[in-house]
Amino acid sequence: MCGATTGGVSLEGVDVTKESVIQGVVTRGEQPVGNAYVRLLDRTGEFTAEVPTSVTGQFRFFAAPGEWTLRTLAPRADVVDRRVVAQQGSIAEVNVSI
């Protein structure tokens, strides 16, 4: 995971035109939540991937185009599900508040 940049996670070195990117930040109040987990579930709810958030609360997936669910798991927080659509050549920015 790259360091925080203005406007989101750095995509330096990534050819976004060839990728479907889902990324964002997990926060509690105004503070980023590090060491939370974000799961990528397919259209049927099946587990596909999981990443921990960085110390700045950031996460990123490279996913196939289509509909996905992000499931965020963090200590002392309810599970948060967010639907997202990934499209090749674009970045789906998802900010999750727990």
Image (cartoon, grey):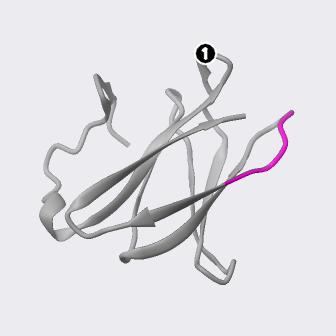
Quadrant (top left/top right/bottom left/bottom right) for the N terminus: top left
Residue 78 spot, x, y in % from top left: 84, 43
Question: Residue 75 sits in which quadrant?
Answer: top right
The amino acid at mark 1 is: Glu
The rendered magenta stretch, by its main secondary structure, is classed as loop
Instruction: Out of 46 and 2, give the one closest to the viewer.
Output: 46
Asked if 88 appears above or below 61 in the picture, the reply is: below
Q: State how many labels appear.
A: 1
Q: Nearer the viewer, residue 67 or 18?
A: 67
Describe residue 39's horizontal placement relative to residue 59 as left or right: right
Image quadrant occupied by the C terminus: top right
Number of residues whose C-alpha sits closer than 10 Å to that of mark 1, classed few (under 14), some (14–19) or many (20 or more): few
Residue 20 in picture, x, y percent from top left: 30, 66
Whether the magenta-drawn stretch holds residue 79 is answered as yes
Q: Secondary structure at mark 1?
A: loop
User: Residue 52's x, y, as percent?
Assistant: 58, 48
Q: Identify the residue at horizontal 67%, vertical 81% (top origin).
A: 46
The residue drawn where x is 65% and y is 49% is 37
Q: Which residue is mark 1?
A: 30
Left or right, 33 with respect to 9, comes to: right
**Residue farthest toward the top in the current orientation of the protein:** 30
**What segment is highlighted magenta in the picture?**
76-81
Residue at 17% from the left image edge and 55% from the top image edge: 14
Q: Is residue 77 left or right of residue 33?
A: right
- Picture coordinates of residue 2, whole percent (x, y): 32, 37
